[in-house]
Image (cartoon, rainbow, N blue to C red):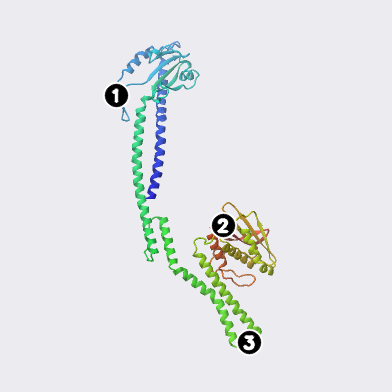
Amino acid sequence: MKLFLVYFLLVGVGLFTFFSNATQQLHPIIRQSAENAMLDTANLLAEILASKTHDDQLDSQFFNEAFEHYRLRNMNASIWEMKKLSPDLGLYITDAKGKVLFHSDQQEIGKDYSRWMDVSRTLKGEYGARTTRIEANNDLTSVMYVAAPILKHNQLIGVLTVFQPASSSQPFIEFAHQQLLTQGSVILLIALGVGALLTYWLTRSIRQLSTYVQKVRSGERPVLPKIHERELAELAEATESMRQELDGKSYIENYVHTLTHEMKSPLAAIRGAAELLEEGNMEVNSQRKFLHNIVSSAHRMQDLIDRLLSLAALENLTELEKVQTVNLLTLVKIEIDAKRSHADRKNIHFKIEANLITDTSGDEFLLKQAISNLLDNALHFAESNTGILLRLEQDNQFQTLCVFNKGPLIPDYAIPRIFERFYSLVHPDTHQKSSGLGLSFVQEIAKLHEGSIHLLNVEKDGNAGVEAEFRIKR
């Protein structure tokens, strides 16, 4: 219903604007057409009069009888369904000084018309025309005047002006206005009918989709409805995919598969060390070594489980549960201090470049976790005796933290998978893989803050390395 009302409003406003503008243009367009016809008439009569003139002396007497017969004509003409019964064209002729020699109203003969715009401009060799109102405040009393020069041997010897009251074209204007109104109403009704059909068609698909979602919500397993609209069909398919994940099939299967795969290595290490310890007759140093392997593998399993649980909790969130006022630069400094010992072991120093970074809203704990993971990733892959550059920027929409480390580049095959759960590259120092959950964790935190995370191979000051770009909304 709302969709139909919006459509009705848009169509109504659009048609009203169009027909309102068209109606406003009717009057000047019809006047322009009349002026064009009057100009041709004036020039034709001027040529006829010039041909009857001898010795450059205007002789307009022959117009008297012709004009009297013209006035008495019964036209009885049907023009576009409008009846025209009698003539309404007037005429006057002046000499080269503007004195009236002939006028359809004989009372005007002998008067000086040289100051009227139609006569004065024509005498100057310009196009002469004017519109004059008999009653100043009534446009229907306007009279249109169009003049033409009377030329004999290329000499201007007088002016011939034809005039016509504006009221003669008013019936045509009113008729055209009525036609526009009628046709506009028909078009509006047709548009509303089409709009109603389209609305029903669209809402039918929406109702189907809504019914499907309600059944899913109630725990049923409905068949995905067939929807012909491409956008709604895509939405229905996305809803079906979401339902399958909510059912736990693909989601749990993926987690169990990857978790089982990741657990194999530490479990195999623990089992192997335990079997060797059971054999006895082992030196103390060897026992300590295998016990260390068991503890290390257990820690790795515990870390994997903890990170997996944290990531699963994040993936189930649709918005931040705890929003605070935080300062990204302050959080960066806190996490750098926490990584000092790790950095000192590789003789890596930190450098911060930051403009004025204002406070923003976010979850302080999650942002610290994201920064910590980015620093861990940079420290693991940074070359010894180098530096890690942290650059903070902000604009009207986002605050951005860029973390650059000199070291091995991300292989092309790994770039599309770098944020996948459990996907990890071999660390150059330990020659082992991490849990592969750190960057996935950072990505989820960025999404919750309406931001993004990107890892890029870049070159800075001649040093090739990797830069992480972590962006959150201000």
In the image, what residue type sits under mark 3?
Met
Indicate the secondary structure of the residue bearing disc 3: loop
> Could you give the CA–CA distance between mark 3 and mark 1, rounded to whole angstroms?
131 Å
Q: Residue at x 33, y 15 (%)?
A: 68
Indicate the secondary structure of the residue bearing disc 2: strand
Q: Residue at x 35, y 36 (%)?
A: 181
In the image, what residue type sits under mark 2?
Ser
Q: Where is mark 2, residue-wise?
A: 361
Select label 2 or label 1 by which is in front: 2
Instruction: Tell me which label, 3 or 1, sits earlier in the chain.
Output: 1
Inspect this view and state whether residue 445 appears: yes
Q: Residue at x 32, y 16 (%)?
A: 69
Whole-percent x, y for residue 141 in the image: 39, 23
Q: Where is mark 3, residue-wise?
A: 282
Q: In the depicted view, which residue is nearer to us: 120 or 204? A: 204
In the image, what residue type sits under mark 1?
Asn
Tell whether 317 sits left or right of 374. left
